[in-house]
Image: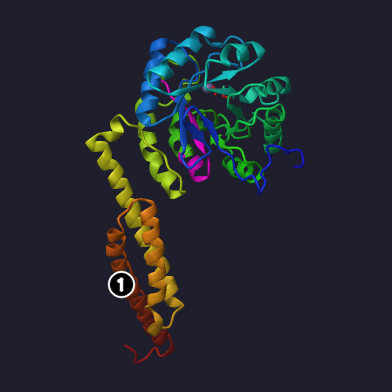
Amino acid sequence: MKDLKLAGLTSEKGTSSIEVNGVTIGGKEIILIGGPCAVESSIQMSLSAETVKKAGGKILRGGVFKPRTSPYSFQGLGQEGLNYLVQAAKEQDLLCVTEVIDTLSLDLVADKVDVIQIGARNMQNFELLKLLGEINKPIILKRGLSATIEEWLLAAEYILAAGNPQVILCERGIRTYEPSTRNTLDISAVGVAKELSHLPVIVDPSHAAGRRDLISALSKAAIAAGADGLLIEMHPNPAEAASDGPQSLYPKQFVQLARELGAVARAVNRVFAGGQGDEESLESLRIQIDGIDQTIIESLAARMQIVRKVGDQKRLDRVKDISRENEVMQRLVNLGNELQLSSELVKGIYPLIFEFAVQSQIKSKLAKEKELKRSLYPIGSK
Ligand code: PEP
Ligand code: MN
């Protein structure tokens, strides 16, 4: 893709992260963005902001200019809604994002919000994209309903070429022949976009699925696939939502999902910093510890399995390899130091792990030998 002159990934520049008012998108941390599809009232936004904060989210969303499929659907509160969004975000010390649809809405919004969203329906509104080049704010660029990844990246290129380097790509599902979900979340688009471009990629599972029961699993899949963040619709009262109620999470579901994201993030070497509020309660801290303990045991089990395979490739009298053990220990002590984990702890735990590994290798080898003998000399062998 030769025309990705600015959006393309090069080995010299590497991937880029975007810094906005203390929040980094595209770094090690997974960024959670949440809020209702449309801003409806001041109280709705205050409750939403409270939930986003509780969940450890960093950015409050809410549409005030809604590009709706039907001209008779709720079109958004405009300026009034913008005030509710900005105020609610401020109350909870969150950043905020809203969608712009044309020059007029861009002018209204540009100085008020931290991040600007371009919706799927405007991904190829090239004149609007060019205008965004002159704005000094990050732009979330949603993938068009039927846009190829190349078209999406070229739309990003428009913004970059016009002078704004801060573009965040957002996969939000594409139109396929499958009717059981509103769209089809293209998980592989995360990997492909990251292979072709240095820009951060986030995922919106809400517009992809169109149903709240799938949001949790799709969010986890997105993080596992390498997404840098999530944009999720949540409403204090989805049954009464002016738009996209069926896909909006209840506040409790949103917080619960956020609690579960940390483990997925850790599994792919990322972090998701859970919220302050509830996250600091004794109960929540214990849930977090339980999750980590489970990961420790699962990792140990996986390690032992690999260790046995290694054992199968060694001679019985060479199973214990002191120099390899020393090398591993040194590396882990150094890692522990970096992470402020006591080297005494690492030195205390690992000899045990090594010892059990050796024992398990010996056991596994002896069992295999016995099995082999039995198959070679089936009669009389014990
Ligand atoms: C939205 O985020 O509310 C929205 C309209 O999304 P999309 O442009 O992806 O349909
Ligand atoms: Mn919506």
Residue 228 location, x and y as percent?
52, 38
Hey, which residue is sitting farthest right in the picture? 2
Quadrant location of residue 198? top right
Q: Is residue 210 above or below residue 83?
A: below
| 186, 182: nearer the viewer | 186
- The crowd level at tag 1 (other Cα within 10 Å; few <14, some 14-19, many 20+) is few
CB of residue at label 1: within 8 Å of ligand 1? Answer: no
Work out whether 381 lies above or below 228: below
Vertical order, 244 against 203 (above or below): above
Q: Is residue 75 visible?
A: yes
Could you tell me if residue 250 is visible in this image? no
For this orientation, the residue located farthest to the top is 80
What type is the residue that disc 1 sits on? Glu
Q: Which residue is mark 1?
A: 355
Q: Quadrant of residue 309?
A: bottom left
Percent position (x, y) of residue 57? 42, 30
Residue ID at (65%, 28%): 164
Q: How far across and down, in percent of the image, does residue 195 sit?
A: 63, 46
Towards the viewer: 318 or 244 = 318
Q: Residue at x 28, y 59 (%)?
A: 345
Q: How many marks?
A: 1
| Quadrant where the N terminus is found in the figure | top right
Q: Is residue 256 magenta?
A: no
What kind of element bears circle 1? helix
Q: Residue furthest left?
A: 282
Report x, y in % for residue 167.
61, 31
The reply to whether the magenta stretch includes residue 230 is: yes
Which range is magenta? 220-235
Most extreme residue toward the bottom is: 380
- Which residue is depicted at the point 30% across and 51% down? 293
